[in-house]
């Protein structure tokens, strides 16, 4: 299965590629809008109960700077968790290797006392030795080899330097804010930490201690997009009204495609709201009143359907309930559909039907035939699954 990974082949041959457009740019834009809106709500506490202000315009002059500060706090939280995981992993490695060594000695001793010949004892030792070497090779990485205080000191110091440098820079556009947060996030990534350690060692060997006085690899100065003529001049208010006008119809269109809404027009009409309600009931999640697909509560939930399903027709679904119940399952879409097909086949046997449904993990025509047969035998019509039929199929009666 590892040989089926297309990322290795693509990156090896083309790198990041030469085309500016990427397939996931629409989804990335939507997720970026959601993230920045949540950061806005964290940064400006007096409007924390409504995100409409954050979508339509920042209420304060230095709004982008506040959003970046809130974003750096979020990055710090995730980075601290990563550093804690690294520390735990490093402590665990030695304990696992010691345990493998103890098991090797104990196993060979038990086999020797039991009268086992030399060859099996030798094979057992080789097997445990291979296990230990495999574990060591898998965990052989600079981040796990270098002393933990080196990594932690480096990351914490780089974070402090970046924050202090950023205080002198005015951030007045969304691209500058995104660049500032991505740069800050890169400080806590494995490749940045390892590169910083290796480059520091190399520079010290070539130029000595004096050569270490240089700009860090990730520098806050790259965020500067404008020249501050006057630090006391008020910042021009950013207007998000056009962004909101473009974002909402695009998001509604994606929802309609993911939830099998017949008319895809970017308008949250009655049919779309009904599909959202059916989807929430299938997950299951509470259904708010009124239903606003772009609200803070519903947007992340519906984005999951957009990200994982995209086009419900391509997966064989016909309504929003089927998408929620079988398309967003934790065990995976294929396993979820296969389990449904097994339940349908079992119910058909109980109802003494001659229709056979195979468990192939695809919502195909034979599955629809099985659903139609169950509905016929139970006094209803159609080939789609709703909440009532789903419960009947699950109960098997």
Image (tube, rainbow, N blue to C red):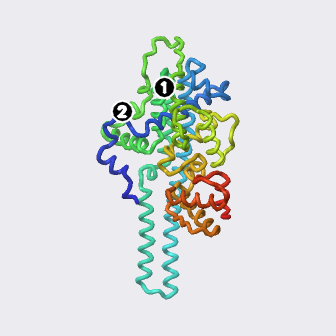
From the viewer's perspective, is residue 345 above or below residue 322? below
Is 380 left or right of 80, judged from the image as shown?
A: right
From the viewer's perspective, is residue 195 above or below residue 169? below
Extreme residue in the right direction: 289
Task: Rate crowding at label 1 as few (under 14), some (14 to 19) or many (20 or more) other CA atoms within 10 Å.
Answer: some
The x, y position of residue 184, in whole percent, is 48, 34
Label 2 element class? helix
Which residue is under mark 1? Answer: 174
CA separation, marks 2 and 1?
A: 38 Å
User: Which residue occupies the foreground of this view, 238 or 85?
Assistant: 238
Please give the label number shown on residue 301. none
Whether residue 384 is visible, yes or no, is yes
Is 201 left or right of 361, judged from the image as shown?
A: left
Which residue is under mark 2? Answer: 210
- Closer to the chain start, of discs 2 and 1, is 1
Label 1 element class? helix
Q: Quadrant of residue 191?
A: top left
């Amino acid at each position: 299965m590892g040989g089926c990974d297309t990322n290795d082949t693509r990156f090896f041959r083309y790198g990041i590629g030469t085309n500016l457009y990427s397939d996931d740019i629409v989804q990335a834009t939507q997720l970026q809008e959601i993230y920045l809106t949540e950061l806005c709500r964290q940064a400006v506490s007096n409007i924390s109960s409504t995100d409409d202000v954050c979508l339509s315009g920042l209420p304060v002059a230095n709004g982008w700077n506040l959003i970046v500060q809130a974003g750096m706090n979020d990055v710090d939280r995730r980075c601290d968790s990563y550093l804690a995981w690294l520390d735990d992993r490093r402590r665990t490695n030695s304990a696992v290797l010691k345990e493998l060594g103890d098991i090797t000695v104990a196993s060979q001793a038990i086999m020797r006392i039991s009268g086992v010949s030399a060859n099996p004892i030798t094979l057992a030792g080789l097997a445990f030795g291979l296990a230990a070497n495999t574990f060591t090779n898998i965990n052989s990485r600079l981040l796990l080899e270098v002393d933990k205080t080196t990594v932690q000191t480096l990351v914490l110091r780089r974070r402090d330097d970046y924050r202090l440098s950023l205080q002198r820079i005015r951030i007045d556009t969304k691209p500058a804010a995104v660049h500032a947060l991505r740069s800050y996030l890169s400080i806590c990534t494995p490749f940045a930490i390892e590169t910083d350690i290796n480059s520091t060692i190399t520079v010290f060997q070539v130029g000595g201690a004096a050569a270490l006085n240089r700009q860090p690899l990730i520098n806050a100065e790259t965020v500067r997009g404008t020249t501050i003529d006057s630090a006391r001049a008020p910042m021009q208010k950013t207007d998000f009204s056009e962004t909101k006008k473009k974002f909402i119809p695009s998001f509604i269109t994606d929802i309609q495609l993911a939830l099998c809404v017949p008319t895809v027009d970017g308008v949250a009409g009655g049919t779309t709201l009904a599909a959202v309600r059916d989807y929430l009931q299938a997950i299951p999640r509470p259904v708010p009143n009124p239903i606003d697909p772009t609200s803070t509560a519903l947007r992340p939930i519906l984005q999951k359907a957009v990200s994982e399903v995209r086009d419900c027709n391509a997966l064989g679904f016909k309504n929003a309930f089927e998408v929620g119940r079988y398309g967003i399952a934790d065990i995976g879409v294929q396993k979820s559909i296969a389990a449904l097909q097994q339940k349908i086949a079992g119910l058909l046997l109980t109802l003494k039907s001659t229709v056979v449904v195979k468990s192939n993990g695809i919502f195909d025509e034979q599955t629809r035939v099985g659903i139609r047969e169950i509905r016929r035998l139970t006094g209803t019509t159609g080939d789609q699954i709703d909440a009532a039929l789903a419960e009947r199929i699950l109960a098997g009666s």
